[in-house]
Amino acid sequence: SEEMGVTRQESDRLAVIHALSSILLASPEDILQSPVLRQCWWNLSQISSPKLQAAILISIAHAFQSLRQQQSQLEENPATMDRSSVALRIYTFLAQDQDDSSSSSQSTTEWLFQKYAKSPMVELRTATYGLWTQLLQTTNSSGMTLLLANPEWWDYLLDADRRETTTEARQVKFELFEELHRQGSGLLAPALVKKLDQLLALGPHGRTPQRFDVALE
């Protein structure tokens, strides 16, 4: 319904998101062409709970994953809408559909970076890394191009001194590095590829692997 508005109750909001996720897969344009439905899903401006904010970001990552899986099943039908373009449109709308005026002038990557990837709340950082990974896996070079447009993002993300504080966050961030590296051939500057090589060599937990016999000496 166009009158449902943005609910603040956590259980209500998650139920709405679940319903909208199903609509997206069945009829993407019903979501994409409705500012009200889009805001019901991913407007975070009125939400103070980091847990709920993270859940909404994760729901978008899951939507990207579902679109990618659906695309593989529908490739034999030439009339089917390209699901990667749906994911790109969702990503573009994320910043535009927030209430605060500053976000509307930012790209979604810049908005996510400033508000969530740099958040002191680990669950928000983790959700953002996962969203970016799913964006890349679903949209490939198009998603990479969006991320390449934000140099500050790369400098911050690839800073080896910014080690994540939980095992889950380190693993999710490492998976993002793996995806960036996988898609970076021919797109990334050699210096960025080298930095990713170094970070991947450290493993998910950001430490240089040691041989057991050396570690005991």
Image: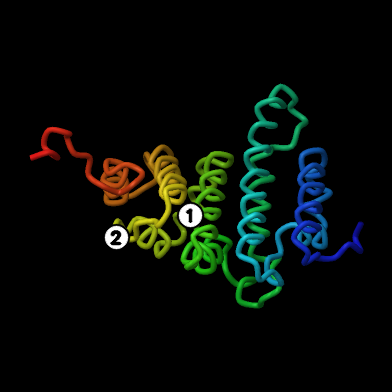
* Residue at the outermost left position: 217
Horizontal side, residue 11 vs residue 117: left or right: right
Q: Which residue is drawn at 41% across and 37% down?
A: 182
Q: What residue type is labelled 1?
A: Leu
Judging depth in this view, the residue of 143 and 9 nearest the camera is: 9
> Residue beneath label 1, please?
147
* Residue at the outermost bottom position: 101
Horizontal side, residue 58 vs residue 125: left or right: right
Label 1: few (<14), some (14–19) or many (≥20) C-alpha neighbours in 10 Å? some
Q: In this view, does 38 lie above or below 210?
A: below
Q: Which mark is residue 6?
A: none
Residue 142 coordinates in the image, percent (x, y): 54, 46
Image quarter (top left, top right, bottom left or bottom right) of the N terminus:
bottom right
Image quarter (top left, top right, bottom left or bottom right) of the C terminus:
top left
Residue 101 coordinates in the image, percent (x, y): 66, 77
Q: Which residue is drawn at 58% across and 61% down?
A: 108
Q: CA separation, marks 1 and 2? A: 21 Å
Where residue 40 sits, quadrant-wise, is bottom right
* Residue at the outermost top position: 76
Residue 22 coordinates in the image, percent (x, y): 79, 42
Q: Which residue is drawn at 68% across and 66% down?
A: 44
Q: Which residue is drawn at 43% across and 53% down?
A: 166
Q: Sequence order check: which comes first, mark 1 or mark 2?
A: 1
Badge 1 marks a residue whose secondary structure is helix
Judging depth in this view, the residue of 125 and 187 nearest the camera is: 125
> Could you tell me if the residues under marks 1 and 2 are in contact, i.e. CB atoms within 8 Å?
no
Where residue 9 sits, quadrant-wise, is bottom right
Q: Residue 161 carries which label?
A: 2
Q: What residue type is labelled 2?
A: Asp
